[in-house]
Amino acid sequence: MKRHLTRRDFARLSGAALATTVLAPGVHEAAAAGGQVVVGTWGGDYENLLQAHVAEQVMKPSGIAVIYDTGGDPARRNKLMAERRLPRGSMDIAALNAAGCYEMWKNGAVEDLDFSKIPNSKHIIAPLRTNYAVPHIYSGQVILYNPKLIKNKPTSYADLWAPENQDKVGIIDIQYIGTIQSAAMINGGSMSNYEPGKEKLLELKKRGVKIYPTNEAMAQALKTEECGMCIMWKARGVMWQNAGIPIEMANPKEGIVLYVSGMVMAKNARNKEQAYAWLDALLDPRAQGDFAKHMGYAPTVDNVTLEPSLASRVMFEPEAQNAFVLQDQDYLAKADAGLQEWWNKVFKG
């Protein structure tokens, strides 16, 4: 029941009726029985896991066909904004990070959800609840390090600035928000004020800190031991460990900032009934357990039992959970453009 939207499909979706040729071969009967839902999401492993563990395992028995509109997070946000005044949009569901979900809700592009239509939502863990998004997976920002290169286990973000770790620290270009945020946390800043982080990062710049363009580039640098320490989500660390990269993880004493990937429903969604079914399926304990196993993210619901060996790797200990920190989405919505401009023109310039 997996299909990507083509340009022709988009044209059909903007018409008054949906032709059955939008669907992949073999799903016409399912679509007739249960309809369809158009899910805007990232591609690659994430989409493949959605297909295997949500679409096939949970949605298929309901006869609902799943169509994927694959692309980047900014493209989805732009599309939601561009289409929000149309009677019907081209996406029913959009996968976004927490900041993106908030931004789209603040701009009136997504629904205030009726959680009575999402039975599994009663199991969402408290820190992840909002009235406009279903949290799908989450992790926390930690320090990844190679114990061969970093002799003392880090306990603080400040350890990235320690003299003995000079020339061993790397940062990731696309993770600019988390990087500025972490620097702010050790320099008098807060979740509502990242400005103090700029001064600390300029110290790293003077030391010649290595900047890698993507998460994948950082993984390669850690694998070859070109880099020995970085800031990253715990889930990504689990994936890299699974790939044989020699790293350990350490919780920073400043607090563990949560990363949440969620899904929102377009206010002008064509298939709202099916969209609610999809949101409920995301929280199904079977699908949640499978994402923990294959992606290293922690379940967002409280009714999933993981194998002890897996739970010890993807979950956080009770004392760490007490140190969870939520981003200030209102602050980020206002400050993001300025932070990115500073990053590109001053820090990287």
Image (cartoon, grey):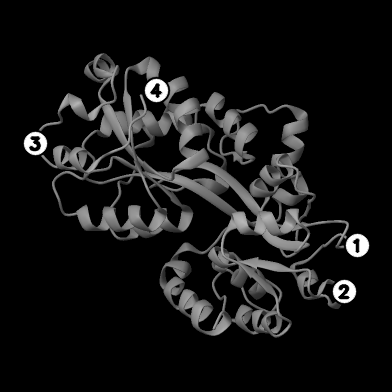
Task: Using the image, determine if residue 201 lies above or below residue 240.
Answer: below
State the CA–CA distance, disc 1 to disc 2.
Answer: 9 Å
State the CA–CA distance, disc 4 to disc 3.
Answer: 25 Å
User: Within 10 angstroms of label 1, few (less than 14), some, or many (20 or more) residues?
Assistant: few
Q: Quadrant of the N terminus?
A: top left
> Which residue position is annotated with label 2?
164
Q: Earlier in the sequence, mark 4 or mark 2?
A: 4
Res. 59 mark: 4
- Residue at 66% x, 74% y is 183
Res. 16 mark: 3
- Residue at 62% x, 48% y is 139
Looking at the rendered structure, the kind of residue marked 3 is Ala
Q: Earlier in the sequence, mark 3 or mark 1?
A: 3
Q: Earlier in the sequence, mark 3 or mark 2?
A: 3
State the CA–CA distance, disc 3 to disc 2.
Answer: 65 Å
The answer to whether 202 appears left or right of 241 in the picture is left
- Residue at 25% x, 23% y is 35
Question: Circle 4 — which element?
Answer: helix
Return the x and y of residue 137 as percentages of the image width and height. Answer: 54, 42
Of labels 3 and 1, the one closer to you: 1
> Which residue position is annotated with label 1?
151
